[in-house]
Amino acid sequence: MGNNKRILVVEDEIDVLALYKDALVSSGFEVESVSNGQEALDILSTDKFDIILLDIVMPVLDGVETLRQIKSDTNKYGTMPVVMLSNIGGDVAIDKALEYGADGYLLKSETDVTELADIVNKYLA
């Protein structure tokens, strides 16, 4: 596809990250990854992405707080869609994230990596 859309994946589980990264790169996306919310904010303040996949449960700074900061300072961090990643369906953190302006969420357990690129493209459309 070679659409060169840039994705930031914020995920602290190495195996999940590797799966997502492989799937997205092989679909023609450029993928950067960091392992916690603070690293995400640091990279977003200097670099722009088309979409962010943001894990909720992470060390240092969790996904909900990271999202809140991104959405509260779009001049600094950008206005790209943010899709939350969670292991837990019906998590109150998901509701909180949607309240803060997340564009949607994926349950890692139910997300087939072969469909990941299609899902991302829907959010980019």
Image (cartoon, helix red, strand yellow):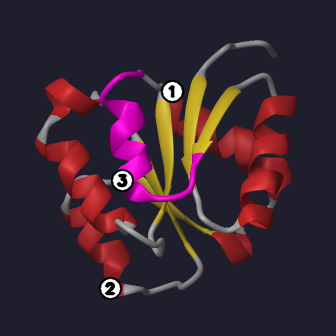
Q: Provide the residue span drawn in magenta.
A: 34-47
Identify the secondary structure beneath mark 2: helix
Give neighbour class at mark 2: few <14, some 14-19, many 20+ (Cα, 10 Å).
few
Kindly indicate whether the residue at mark 1 contacts the one at mark 3 (C-beta within 8 angstroms).
no
> Which residue is depicted at the point 39% across and 56% down?
37
Question: What type is the residue that disc 1 sits on?
Answer: Ala
Q: Tell how many labels.
A: 3
Position of the N terminus, as image quadrant, is top right
Quick check: 4 above or below 76?
above
| Residue 80 in view of the camera | no
First reached walking from the N terminus: tag 2 or tag 3: 3
Q: Which residue is mark 2?
A: 92
Q: Quadrant of residue 27?
A: top right
- Residue 87 is situated, as x and y percent measured from the top left of the image, at 59, 80
Give neighbour class at mark 3: few <14, some 14-19, many 20+ (Cα, 10 Å).
some
| Residue 38 in view of the camera | yes
Q: Nearer the viewer, residue 1 or 6?
A: 6
Q: Which residue is mark 3?
A: 38
Question: What type is the residue that disc 3 sits on?
Answer: Gln
- Residue 66 is situated, as x and y percent measured from the top left of the image, at 30, 56
> Which residue is depicted at the point 44% across and 87% down?
90
First reached walking from the N terminus: tag 3 or tag 1: 3
Kindly indicate whether the residue at mark 3 contacts the one at mark 2 (C-beta within 8 angstroms).
no
Q: CA distance from mark 2 to mark 3?
A: 22 Å
> Which residue is depicted at the point 35% across and 39% down?
42
Q: Which residue is mark 1?
A: 125
Identify the secondary structure beneath mark 1: loop
Identify the secondary structure beneath mark 3: helix
In the image, 121: left or right of 29?
left
Q: Which-is-in-front pick, marks 2 and 3?
A: 3
